[in-house]
Image (cartoon, helix red, strand yellow):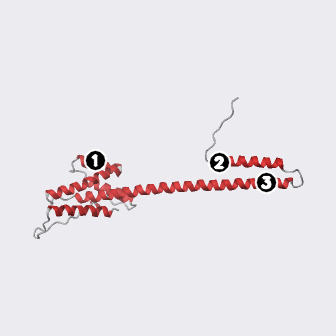
Amino acid sequence: MKFLSFKIDKEVRPVIIVAVIVSCCLLMLKSNLPKNDEYEKNLILATGFGITIISWFMVGYINNKNEIKRNDLANAKSILETKRSLRIKFLLDAYFRLENMEQRNYESLTDYFIYMKYGESALTSIQLLGEQEVVKLSNNFILSNGQKYFQELLIQLRADLRKELMLADLPNTPDFAPVMFRFKKNPDVSFDLTAEQKLQLTIKLNELNLLMVK
């Protein structure tokens, strides 16, 4: 003989078990109650007591499940916020690094090389954490050996960051294109640094950028 089988949701099994146990207890109590004038009254009291127990258990069980769900949602939200903050931090650093390596043609070859090396990790961060369009532009920039797509890359990265920071979009016009300000040494003023001083200055600039995005 094949019995009818069905699946019970795991979340409602405890409630069903308690309800069955209480029902069995009530049936046993009913059968043992003396058949007198107080029988119906006692039966009503016992039934009310059983319903109260089931209700308490169900309320506690539902509250516990809701608390677990609230904690799970809070943890998921915290993880997403942490990921978002970490992503913004590294992409901001990438933007500063890229912006800092542009318009360095007037520097010495040594300094120019340092600034280019300074921007290499920015491209890695973009490829790891960037959106599709900015990753594509960074790849094009790399494949062109740094000769093309720089302005487009910087504009797209800036747009993505402003979106993440919930800032208003900037018009895609030359008036709002990224412009780099570079301090240039006055040739009439003696301002020579040793190679070691220049390296230390670059390291300090790098540390300053990292502090800005913490």
Q: Earlier in the sequence, mark 2 or mark 1?
A: 2
Amino acid bearing label 1: Asn
Instruction: Tell which of 50 and 166 is nearer to you.
Output: 50
Q: CA distance from mark 3 to mark 2?
A: 22 Å
Instruction: Tell which of 139 and 87 is nearer to you.
Output: 87
The residue carrying pointer 3 sits among few (fewer than 14), some (14 to 19) or many (20 or more) residues within 10 Å by Cα, namely some
Q: Which residue is mark 3?
A: 46
Q: Which residue is mark 1?
A: 139
Q: Does dot 1 land on a helix, a strand or a loop?
A: helix
Q: Does dot 3 land on a helix, a strand or a loop?
A: helix
Q: Does dot 2 land on a helix, a strand or a loop?
A: helix
Q: Answer with the quarter of the image where residue 109 lies.
A: bottom left
Q: Which residue is mark 2?
A: 14
The residue carrying pointer 2 sits among few (fewer than 14), some (14 to 19) or many (20 or more) residues within 10 Å by Cα, namely some
Q: Who's the residue at 43% across and 57% down the image?
A: 81
Specify whether 89 is left or right of 79.
Answer: left
Amino acid bearing label 3: Ala
Q: Answer with the quarter of the image where residue 101 lies.
A: bottom left
Specify whether 101 is left or right of 14.
Answer: left
Residue 179 can be seen, yes or no: no
Amino acid bearing label 2: Pro
The percent position of residue 127, horizontal first and vertical second, equals 32, 49
The percent position of residue 11, horizontal first and vertical second, equals 61, 47
Q: Who's the residue at 85% across and 53% down the image?
A: 40
Instruction: Tell which of 198 and 105 is nearer to you.
Output: 198
The percent position of residue 202, horizontal first and vertical second, equals 22, 61
Q: Residue furthest left?
A: 188
The N terminus is located in which quarter?
top right
